[in-house]
């Protein structure tokens, strides 16, 4: 068995410190209000909407933490994620410590390097992105590493497959693997092949007479964990029906938690060339030891699988694989440091031992560096711009209003606000990208029969018509997002109304079209100041507000209202000083003013920027 010596009190204390520090840092940075990136997970885990396969362990854990009567529902979900990441950090420590002890023959130093590796992974940008927001890959990451810990122990007992301890380990592996398959298909497959690689390397397999029991435990666990997949679509509530419709879409949240770091260049930017070199050194030398070969093989395969798979496993799969690769590379880097320290300790030179100590100290500083780097992108404790936008978008509309939404990000934000937080259930949200999926249309028509012409137009052409919008606007106050394909006469019905464009059937005067002049979204409103109110900029909210300002400026400029359009461009420049849309739009408006062109200026083709 790989380093079978029982851990000392110091080694256990360092393991507990890893869990405590990981949990505390994630808790401090956790979201206290709704976030754009977490709307889909909130609908699934808090709103109990059926959003496709997977995510069932996250739902159970989030629902458990939501029973604690402290903080908002979003903050309770972030506490659940922080707890899962702390569990994953503790398991990473338990995976790394025997490997390092095997390389160093020094339990205390091995535990110190193992704690450094676990904390570097847990406090880095990749893991913190999942630790500070409900949903994500936190549950799958924790389950995978728990399974890896148990598999390391089980595969370290060759020729004792019928021993009670080995039997208990394999039963626990079956439970963890089944739960991981219910949470993430990609994670379940990754754990299965990891256990297989460790079993073959260690020549340790479950006893033949126990395999039937393992299969039954696997099946029962999977059925219990995935029970919500059967119950959710049958729930007699509107959000469950809408959620079932959302489950068959391929819409993505605003930002990809995995980012764009699933390549070697991405690893270099996140971990550094030196760390990658040490990781390669550590894996090469550790792989030469027979007893460590199984675990080292898993550490090698995880980054390779991410590199080969790319985006073919889906967004959630990419996020999980990148998190697993980050953890594997951090453990491998610690192995490289251990090999370097071992080499320095054996040198018969005057300063060799001091150089070894300095190497360990230098490696420990990596924890602080990656933690500081992660704060810029993952600290959500002071992000309230999404909540302010929701208050303006839902709270300011008229009673029983209808909103035609084109953007998936706004659709999920409104659905989450209504069905998770209970805001404005009287408002009818018409998410045009989702109308062709599931039971969205059958659910909408009973609530508003006058939607029929608009739904027919959207189904046939993909775009709303003047007649369909006018019929709906006669029945309800109507707010819309700008469609770049709308004709001039349809845009002539629009007026600014906070984050929306209000559609009015009758002819409008120029002052009515100006509306609020962009004050709600501008620097004098409540949303823009929130974007930069915390220590770090709220980039997703800035993207949403900037997009809305561009659409409003495009609508006003098309109607010949160049001065109000310039005002919106100024607000956009304050928000995004280097945005190419504002620069190009300003040139076109200046040209129209110079040539005394009274016709509208077309800016909608610039919305691609």
Image (cartoon, rainbow, N blue to C red):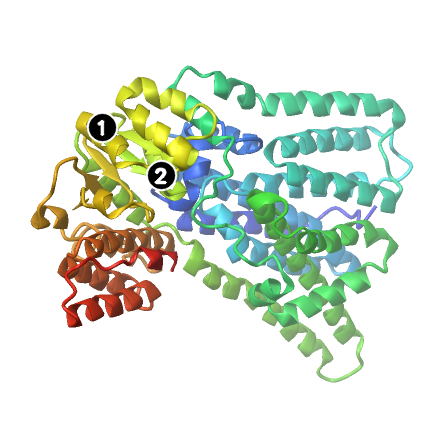
Give the x, y percent position of residue 558.
22, 54
What secondary structure is found at the residue carrying circle 1?
Answer: helix
Give the x, y percent position of residue 241.
43, 22
Q: Quadrant of residue 507?
A: top left
Single out the residue that lies furthest toward the bottom: 350
Give the x, y percent position of residue 262.
61, 57
Figure quadrant of the C terminus: bottom left
| N-terminal label among 1 and 2 | 2
Q: Residue at x 46, y 63 (%)?
A: 372
What label sits on residue 463 in the rendered view?
2
For this rendering, which residue is in front, 1 or 325? 325
For this rendering, which residue is in front, 600 or 7? 600
Q: Residue at x 81, y 45 (%)?
A: 197
Q: Quadrant of residue 56?
A: top right
What label sits on residue 471 in the rendered view?
1
How packed is label 2: few (under 14 Cα within 10 Å), some, or many (20 or more)? some
Where is 428 relative to 541, above or below? above
Spatial CA span between label 1 and label 2: 15 Å
What label sits on residue 311 in the rendered view?
none
Where is 270 relative to 93, above or below? below
Where is 248 relative to 507, above or below? above
What secondary structure is found at the residue carrying circle 2?
Answer: loop
Regarding residue 476, the answer to whether it shows in the image is yes
Q: Residue at x 23, y 42 (%)?
A: 490
């Amino acid at each position: 068995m790989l380093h079978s010596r029982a851990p000392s009190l110091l080694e256990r204390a360092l393991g507990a410190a890893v869990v405590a520090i990981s949990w505390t840092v994630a808790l401090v940075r956790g979201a206290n209000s709704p976030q754009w990136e977490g709307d889909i997970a909130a609908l699934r885990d808090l709103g109990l909407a059926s959003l496709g396969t997977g995510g069932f362990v996250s739902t159970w854990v989030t629902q458990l933490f939501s029973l604690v009567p402290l903080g908002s529902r979003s903050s309770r979900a972030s506490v659940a994620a922080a707890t899962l990441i702390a569990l994953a950090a503790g398991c990473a420590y338990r995976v790394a410590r025997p490997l390092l002890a095997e390389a160093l023959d020094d339990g205390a130093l091995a535990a110190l390097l193992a704690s450094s590796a676990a904390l570097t992974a847990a406090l880095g940008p990749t893991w913190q992105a999942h630790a500070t927001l409900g949903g994500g890959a936190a549950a799958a990451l924790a389950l995978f590493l728990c399974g890896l810990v148990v598999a390391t122990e089980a595969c370290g007992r060759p020729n004792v497959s019928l021993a009670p301890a080995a039997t208990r380990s394999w039963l626990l592996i079956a439970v963890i693997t089944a739960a991981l398959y219910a949470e993430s298909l990609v994670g379940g497959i990754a754990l299965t092949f990891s256990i297989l690689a460790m079993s073959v390397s260690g020549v340790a397999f479950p006893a033949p007479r126990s395999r039937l029991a393992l299969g039954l435990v696997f099946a029962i666990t999977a059925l219990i964990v995935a029970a919500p997949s059967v119950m959710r679509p049958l729930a007699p509530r509107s959000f469950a029906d809408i959620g079932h419709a959302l489950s068959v879409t391929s819409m993505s949240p605003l930002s990809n938690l995995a980012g764009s770091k699933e390549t070697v260049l991405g690893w270099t930017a996140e971990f550094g060339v030196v760390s990658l070199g040490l990781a390669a050194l550590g894996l090469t030398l550790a792989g030469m030891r027979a007893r460590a070969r199984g675990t080292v093989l898993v550490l090698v395969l995880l980054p390779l699988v991410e590199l080969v798979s790319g985006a073919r496993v889906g967004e959630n799969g990419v996020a999980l694989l990148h998190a697993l690769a980050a953890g594997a590379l951090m453990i491998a880097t610690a192995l490289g440091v251990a090999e370097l320290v071992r080499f320095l300790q054996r040198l018969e030179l005057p300063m060799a031992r001091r150089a070894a100590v300095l190497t360990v100290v230098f490696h420990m500083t990596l924890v602080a560096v990656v933690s500081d780097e992660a704060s810029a992108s993952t600290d959500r404790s002071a992000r309230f711009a999404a909540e302010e936008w929701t208050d303006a978008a839902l709270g300011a509309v008229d009673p029983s209003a209808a909103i035609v939404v084109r953007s998936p990000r706004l659709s999920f934000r409104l659905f989450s606000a209504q069905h998770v937080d209970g805001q404005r259930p009287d408002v009818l949200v018409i998410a045009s990208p989702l109308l062709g999926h599931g039971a969205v249309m059958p659910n909408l028509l009973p609530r508003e029969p006058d939607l029929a012409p608009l739904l027919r137009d959207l189904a046939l052409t993909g775009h709303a018509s003047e007649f369909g919008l006018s019929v709906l606007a006669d029945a309800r106050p109507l707010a819309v997002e700008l469609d770049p394909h709308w004709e001039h006469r349809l845009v002539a019905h629009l007026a600014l109304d906070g984050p929306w464009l209000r559609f009015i059937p009758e002819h409008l005067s120029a002052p009515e079209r100006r509306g609020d002049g962009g004050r709600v979204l501008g620097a004098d409103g409540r949303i823009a100041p929130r974007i930069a109110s915390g220590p770090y900029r709220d980039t997703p909210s800035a993207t949403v507000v900037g997009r809305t300002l561009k659409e409003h400026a495009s609508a006003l400029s098309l109607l010949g209202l160049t001065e109000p359009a310039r005002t919106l461009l100024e607000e956009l420049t304050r928000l995004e000083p280097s945005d190419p849309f504002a620069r190009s739009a300003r040139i076109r408006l200046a040209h129209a003013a110079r040539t005394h062109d009274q016709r509208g200026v077309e800016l909608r083709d610039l919305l691609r920027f």
